[in-house]
Amino acid sequence: MPAVRSVLVIGAGAAGTATAIRLAEAGVSVDLVEAKPDVSALGSGITLQGNALRVLEQLGVWEQVEAEGYGYDTLGLRAPDPAGTLIVELTEDRTGGPDLPATMGMYRPTLARILADRASDAGAKLRFGLTATGLEQDADGVTVSFADGSTGRYDVVVGADGIGSWTRAQIGIETRPEPVGMGIWRAFTARPDSVTRTDLVYGGPSYIAGYCPTSEDSLYAYIVEPAQDRTGLTPEEGLTVMRELSEGYHGPWDEIRAHLTVPDRVNHTHFESHVVDGAWNRGRVVIIGDAAHSCPPTLAQGAAQALEDAVVLAELLTTHDTLDHVWPALTDRRLPRAKAVVEASLQLCRWLLDHEQGDVPGLMGRIAALVSEPA
Ligand SMILES: Cc1cc2nc3c(=O)[nH]c(=O)nc-3n(C[C@H](O)[C@H](O)[C@H](O)COP(=O)(O)OP(=O)(O)OC[C@H]3O[C@@H](n4cnc5c(N)ncnc54)[C@H](O)[C@@H]3O)c2cc1C
């Protein structure tokens, strides 16, 4: 008999929806609560590496992801010079297996909708615009109270509630994300024909400038700068800052800049990072995804690691007959890998912050080899 019959998942990001899909498919009764009112809120793009695509295939959504995203197998490194000179075109490892592209760009809300619909179809009960407000656990289960006054009783609660995790604080895990010293401007806009894969420029006026096609007619572009307070800027001022920063970059950037015209399509955030370096559960409550570990997106592995956490946790919960065996197995399977990815992502930031010439392709190759092994 599986270790659980009923599970509450808190948070409908990649980690939460993937957990809900796998558990519901295995016959577990799943409630999924999400604080946001729906999945359609405006967002930017996301880069999904092959190991994320392998999980999406396991979740039964690959065909939809393939139809709505933009896949490719190479990575360009360009110079911060007036021509945006292509220095090298690297063939990326197909870390998800030979039948999946090395990388795929997608519009985040599209991915969120595909996963939420799949969770619902699998039998999970999704409730949007709802937060958990209290957790009380005893030897037999967890009683949860919700903001609408309702309560529920579950065998296990999964906190997949992101980097600022409420669940993590509730169960007394004190690890908190730390600033990395960098901020990122991102814009979602039209794809010029010249953009058919990710190109990165290291250096120039900012630390990194890059872009990723997200569909036939869209892309997201980003510029990583030293951390600074950008909170007081209006959307129009934010757009102006991003356009000005982009003027240090050329080649396809010249066409992208011409499309940077819609203030609401530009956003700014800071890089933060943490790893809960030990068990991710306290009793019957466990955290996964960004709640347990977060990395700056320099290797675009955050969502991939969140998805891997989800399928491993669901597998353990449905194949072990006691929770006592689940938790150490989760730590063994997930902590070393997630920690290695966080460390490597931070290393890339450190090289940039210290203006040090690190072996970027070597580091990327090492992580690609690691994540090529199924989680
Ligand atoms: C600038 C930036 C760029 C990135 N780019 C990439 C990339 O290209 N590729 C990549 O793989 N990763 C990227 N990442 C990382 C990636 O976004 C995360 O690792 C991933 O989204 C984590 O998924 P998650 O499900 O754990 O958390 P989230 O996606 O954060 O989902 C958590 C969900 O929980 C909900 N929630 C929070 N609190 C509560 C509550 N109390 N009750 C109910 N619901 C709650 C939130 O509304 C949210 O929907 C990037 C991160 C940043 C900051």
Image (tube, rainbow, N blue to C red):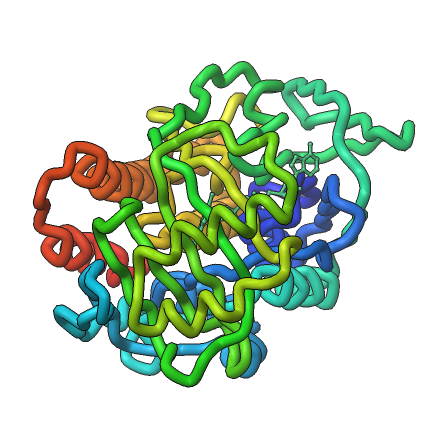
**Residue placed at 45% from the left, 52% from the top?**
303
Quick check: 114 left or right of 55?
A: right
- 279 above or below 299? above
Query: In x, y percent, where is residue 264?
Result: 66, 54
Query: In x, y percent, where is residue 345?
Result: 27, 43
Query: In x, y percent, where is residue 364?
Result: 19, 55
**Residue placed at 20% from the left, 38% from the top?**
347
Query: In x, y percent, where is residue 341?
Result: 28, 44
Give the quadrant of the C terminus. bottom left
Q: In which image quadrant can residue 100 be found?
A: bottom left
Q: Between residues 34 and 108, which one lies in front from this camera angle?
A: 108
Q: Between residues 214 and 309, which one lies in front from this camera angle?
A: 214
Q: Quadrant of ligand 1?
A: top right
**Residue placed at 36% from the left, 35% from the top?**
182
Q: Between residues 331 and 48, which one lies in front from this camera angle?
A: 48
> Seen from this angle, which residue lies furthest right?
149
- 64 above or below 141? below
Asked if residue 319 shows in the view, the reply is no
Asked if residue 339 shows in the view, the reply is yes
Q: In which image quadrant can residue 161 be found?
A: top right
**Residue placed at 50% from the left, 39% from the top?**
269
Picture mark count: 0
Q: Between residues 167 and 144, which one lies in front from this camera angle?
A: 167
Quick check: 294 left or right of 139?
A: left
